[in-house]
Amino acid sequence: MANLRSASYHFLLALQFLVVLQTKVLCYQYKVGDLDAWGIPTSANPQVYTQWSKYHNLKIGDSLLFLYPPSQDSVIQVTEQSYNSCNLKDPILYMNNGNSLFNITTYGEFYFTSGEQGHCEKNQKLHISVLSGNGSAYSPSYGPSALPDISPSYPTVFGTIPQPPSSSTSSSSSSLGVPVFVAAVAGFAVRALVGGIM
Ligand SMILES: *[C@@H]1O[C@H](CO)[C@@H](O)[C@H](O)[C@H]1NC(C)=O
Ligand SMILES: *[C@@H]1O[C@H](CO)[C@@H](O)[C@H](O)[C@H]1NC(C)=O
């Protein structure tokens, strides 16, 4: 029984590891506004950046891609005050290569606007909230989707360890259980790795 306990303990550890792995692998690069160009919103959609950030749940590890003609625009990260007042002085970060990637490495509030005069006033500004990974904000969308994929194998793993009929076969059957378990875990690992690569 001790064997089975430690086997299931290790199984849970492996499971936990895979869930963490899958969560880590699922990082996204978002094109800001889903637009091909970071720029002054058109009159048809003046709130494009506000709308966009409302419907995207950004996490640590994700990145924001700002695409724009480098001679015509730029991206600055600013404080909340500067964001509200469109103060372009002393930005936290200034990017103007036309293909700017902002990597989200901490949680918190992030404020961006254009470094060009007048653009902020025309709503070329973006505010995102990255919620901390430990609270209610933990995005659970990946956990549950990973679990059903793995759990069907669970009965298989322990199904090979029958209740010992108290005969001499019990020792051989319980030693059989471990290789099957190892094979199953290896299978998961391979699947996770393949999934991670693709
Ligand atoms: C984000 O990461 C990419 C590569 O991983 C790097 O090229 C880029 O400079 C980073 N962005 C910032 C703002 O540090
Ligand atoms: C975890 O959440 C608590 C409150 O919900 C917060 O005070 C703390 O800074 C958070 N820690 C991390 C590492 O996110």
Image (cartoon, grey):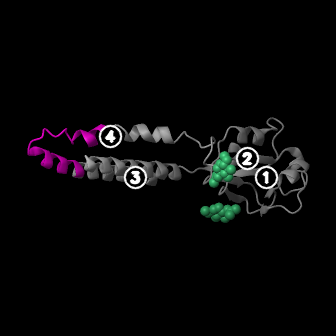
For the residues labelled 3 and 2, the Cα–Cα distance comes to 32 Å
Who comes first in sequence, dot 3 or dot 4? 4
In the foreground, 102 or 36: 102
Magenta extent: 154-178
Who comes first in sequence, dot 1 or dot 3? 1
Instruction: Report helix, strand or loop for mark 4.
Output: helix
Report crowding for label 4: few under 14, some 14 to 19, many 20 or more residues within 10 A (C-alpha): few
Instruction: Report helix, strand or loop for mark 3.
Output: helix
Find disc 2 in the rendering and name its residue: 128
Find disc 4 in the rendering and name its residue: 154
Find disc 3 in the rendering and name its residue: 194
For the residues labelled 2 and 4, the Cα–Cα distance comes to 40 Å
* Contact? badges 3 and 2 (CB < 8 Å): no
In the foreground, 151 or 164: 164
**Label annotation for residue 112:** 1
For the residues labelled 4 and 1, the Cα–Cα distance comes to 47 Å
Instruction: Report helix, strand or loop for mark 1.
Output: strand
**Main secondary structure along the magenta-highlighted residues:** helix
* Contact? badges 2 and 4 (CB < 8 Å): no
Q: Is 160 included in the stretch rendered in magenta?
A: yes
* Contact? badges 3 and 4 (CB < 8 Å): no
The amino acid on which the numbered mark 1 sits, given as a three-letter code, is Phe
Q: Closer to the observer: label 4 or label 1? A: 4
